[in-house]
Amino acid sequence: MAQAKCRPREKPRLRTELSDGDAARLDEAVELFGLPKAEIVRRLIRASVQAGPALSAENMEAVLTLASEVRQVGRTLAQMLRMMRQGRGMELAAAEQVWSELHGAIAAIDEELTEMTVAHGAGLRRLARLSVIDMAPTKGPAA
């Protein structure tokens, strides 16, 4: 009998083992984007090379500014705590205003960080040519 001549594969292949968590995330991506697993992996590889660093120079400056603001909030809280321990607490009306301002500062910092991360994620999805399919909940039968 003549042996069949094996032709080398024309395209490189990748075989990898995933943790249960990573496999679950890949399954979520398949459901979310409506693409096969192999296509999701190919697009992620392409996007990872094109995406560049996680933070742009502008975002890095914003993070440094936000870190400074967080330190200021921390100093204010430490001063208030020190005064309370020394029995020099302020009246409730004055304390409420300070707490409200601190809460507002923390909320603003959180909002700005969220905007940066959402924008970066959207950029990565754009580079990978992945768009989220409509995941609006379907209405069940009327009761």
Image (spheres, rainbow, N blue to C red):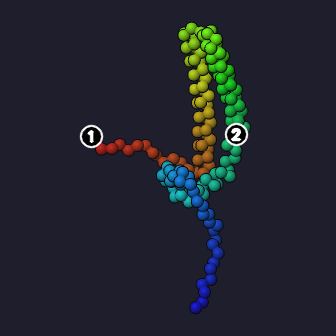
Q: Nearer the viewer, residue 67 or 75?
A: 75
Q: Which residue is mark 1?
A: 143
Disc 1 residue crowd, few under 14, some 14–19, many 20+, Cα 10 Å: few
Q: Secondary structure at mark 2?
A: loop
User: 128 or 99: which is nearer to us?
Assistant: 99
Q: Residue at x 61, y 10 (%)?
A: 87
Q: Quadrant of the C terminus?
A: top left
- Note whether 21 is above or below 57 in the view shown: below
Q: Position of residue 31 (x, y in %)?
A: 48, 52
Q: Earlier in the sequence, mark 2 or mark 1?
A: 2
Can the viewer see residue 52?
yes
Could you tell me which residue is drawn at 63 percent across and 68 percent down?
A: 11
Pick out the residue farthest to the left. 143
Q: What amino acid type is highlighted by mark number 1?
A: Ala
Q: Which mark is residue 56?
A: 2
Q: Residue most toward the bottom?
A: 1
Give percent across and percent down for residue 106: 60, 25
Q: To which quarter of the image does residue 60 belong?
A: top right
Q: Is residue 33 visible to the viewer in this orientation of the structure?
A: no
Report the side of 140 relative to 131 (left or right).
left
Q: In the displayed orientation, state which residue is furthest to the front.
A: 86
Question: Which residue lies at the image location 60% right of the left edge and 57% below the top edge?
Answer: 42
CA neighbours of label 2 inside 10 A, class few (<14), some (14 to 19), many (20+): few
**Amino acid at pointer 2:** Ser
Above or below 114: residue 17: below
- Residue located 61% across and 23% down the image: 105
Q: Is residue 136 left or right of residue 97?
A: left
